[in-house]
């Protein structure tokens, strides 16, 4: 399996999972070797690995590690419990849930009962490799479809993006960032504005780092600066990813996405979501029913997310607020479909975004 990324964020060696530690980017490039499901779950919770597709892929390799680490075949219930604790690690993105559902239809109870531990392990590894490869291909197809939205005769384009949707978050070149990389390949001169994405700074740390690696011009802006930006400069599109898209096209994505969408509509800037068909949750009618993950208050008040397991800070300890100050830290928000110009998927672009168009393109 290969892609043209300059780094490997998720690397399966055959007996362990090596994750690029995203807490430490851009301060250092360090890898964490996971030899157990428990460590993979911790890595997901602590956002050592993050981004909806990357969480799902790492999780399934985590199940392979669980089976590799035992000598005796477990009861089916034990496997189900492991899958449940994995599923609980981060609730908003749907990709992990769909991967687990697909896995349990491959390794169903009947198959489980009649297979040896060795066979189950090798089928689990094959499944994880398969969805890794699928994500890689899907990224390229999304990128191709996304480039078609930009006129061939206007080569200078400016894009606002939010959070991180690139090689760090996927198996391949990414979703929204994948479109940007494909545009550059096609000869467009890109200027990308990456909103910092507080409190975890996926924009100012991760997206700015990835775009620098790809030699794409990038300006970091504060999350609150997008109205100024769209008023002051010509922005051709807002391009973001997704964690869960409902039947009617409402889209959960990193907190702050909704305000960019509302502002984009005001300034008549097209607002695109780039996501794979595995981001759709057809069990949910609309965005009101998406469970939004609330994360720790001290991510806002103390930058504590940049601490390692021993409490050591990667950046100088930053106390950002008075001691004892309370904070709310919803990790995602939901952008109603009425603000979304189009959803760029590997199967085509859904526009306008409504249940019928979603059905006819995604097919469910
Ligand atoms: O909390 P995170 O960093 O996992 O959130 C990530 C996002 O919201 C991304 O935009 C989304 O998962 C798409 S990544 C291709």
Image (cartoon, rainbow, N blue to C red):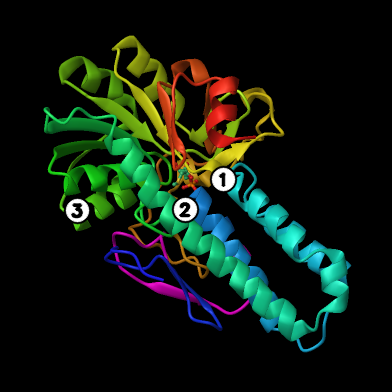
Please give the label number shown on residue 304: 2
Q: Which mark is residue 212?
A: 3
Magenta-span inclusion, residue 123: no
Q: Nearer the viewer, mark 2 or mark 1?
A: 1
First-in-chain label (3 vs 2): 3
Q: Nearer the viewer, residue 7 or 151?
A: 151
> What residue sits right under mark 1 in the picture?
278
Residue extending farthest bottom: 71
Question: Marks 3 and 2, Cα distance to the nearest angstrom?
Answer: 26 Å
Closer to the eye: label 1 or 3: 1
Is 144 rendered above or below residue 106? above
Residue in the picture at 55% in, 19% down? 354
- Of marks 2 and 1, which one's residue comes earlier in the chain? 1
Read off the magenta span. 21-43
Q: Which quadrant holds residue 119?
A: bottom right
Q: Residues within 10 Å of mark 1 (few under 14, many from 20)?
A: many
Q: Closest to the observer: 253 or 245?
A: 245
How many marks the image carries: the answer is 3
Side of 200 relative to 113 (left or right)? left
Quadrant location, the C terminus: top right
| Nearer to me, 363 or 271 | 363
Side of 262 where 53 appears, left or right: right
Dot 2, how many residues are within 10 Å of its Cα: few (below 14), some (14-19), or many (20+)?
many
Q: Are circles 1 and 3 on residues that touch, CB within 8 Å?
A: no
Indicate left or right for 283 with 22 as reference: right
Q: What residue appears at the point 82 percent right and 82 percent down from the top-left corner?
A: 73
**SS at mark 1 in the image:** helix
User: Residue 78, relative to residue 74: is it above or below?
Assistant: above
The spot of residue 109 in percent (x, y) is 86, 65
One can see residue 206 in this view: yes
């Amino acid at each position: 399996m290969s892609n043209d990324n300059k780094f490997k964020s998720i690397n399966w060696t055959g007996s362990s999972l090596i994750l690029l530690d995203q807490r430490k980017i851009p301060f250092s490039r360090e890898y964490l070797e996971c030899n157990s499901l428990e460590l993979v779950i911790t890595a997901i919770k602590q956002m050592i690995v993050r981004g909806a597709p990357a969480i799902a892929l790492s999780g399934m390799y985590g199940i392979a590690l669980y089976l590799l680490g035992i000598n005796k075949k477990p009861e089916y219930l034990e496997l189900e419990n492991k899958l449940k604790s994995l599923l609980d690690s981060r609730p908003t993105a749907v990709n992990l849930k769909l991967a687990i559902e697909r896995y349990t239809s491959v390794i169903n109870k009947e198959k489980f009962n009649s297979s040896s531990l060795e066979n189950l392990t090798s089928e689990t590894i094959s499944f994880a490799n398969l969805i890794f490869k699928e994500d890689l291909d899907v990224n390229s197809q999304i990128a191709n479809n996304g480039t078609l939205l930009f006129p061939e005769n206007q080569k200078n384009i400016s894009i606002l993006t939010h959070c991180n949707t690139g090689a760090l978050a996927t198996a391949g070149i990414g979703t929204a960032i994948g479109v940007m990389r494909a545009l550059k390949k096609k000869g467009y001169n890109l200027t990308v504005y990456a909103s910092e994405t507080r409190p975890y700074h996926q924009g100012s740390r991760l997206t700015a780092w990835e775009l620098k690696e790809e030699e794409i011009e990038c300006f970091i802006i504060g999350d609150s600066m997008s109205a100024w930006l769209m008023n002051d400069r010509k922005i051709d599109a807002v391009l973001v990813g997704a964690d869960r898209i409902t039947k009617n096209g409402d889209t959960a994505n990193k907190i702050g996405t909704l305000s960019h969408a509302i502002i984009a509509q005001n300034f008549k800037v097209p607002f695109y979501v780039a996501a794979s068909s595995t981001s759709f949750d057809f069990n949910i009618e609309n965005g009101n029913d998406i469970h939004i993950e609330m994360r720790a208050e001290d991510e806002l008040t103390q930058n504590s997310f940049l601490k390692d397991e021993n409490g050591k800070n990667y950046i100088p300890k930053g106390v950002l607020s008075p001691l004892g100050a309370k904070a709310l830290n919803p990790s995602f928000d939901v952008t109603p479909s009425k603000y979304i110009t189009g959803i760029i998927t590997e199967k085509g672009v859904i526009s306008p975004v409504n249940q019928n168009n979603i059905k006819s393109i995604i097919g469910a």
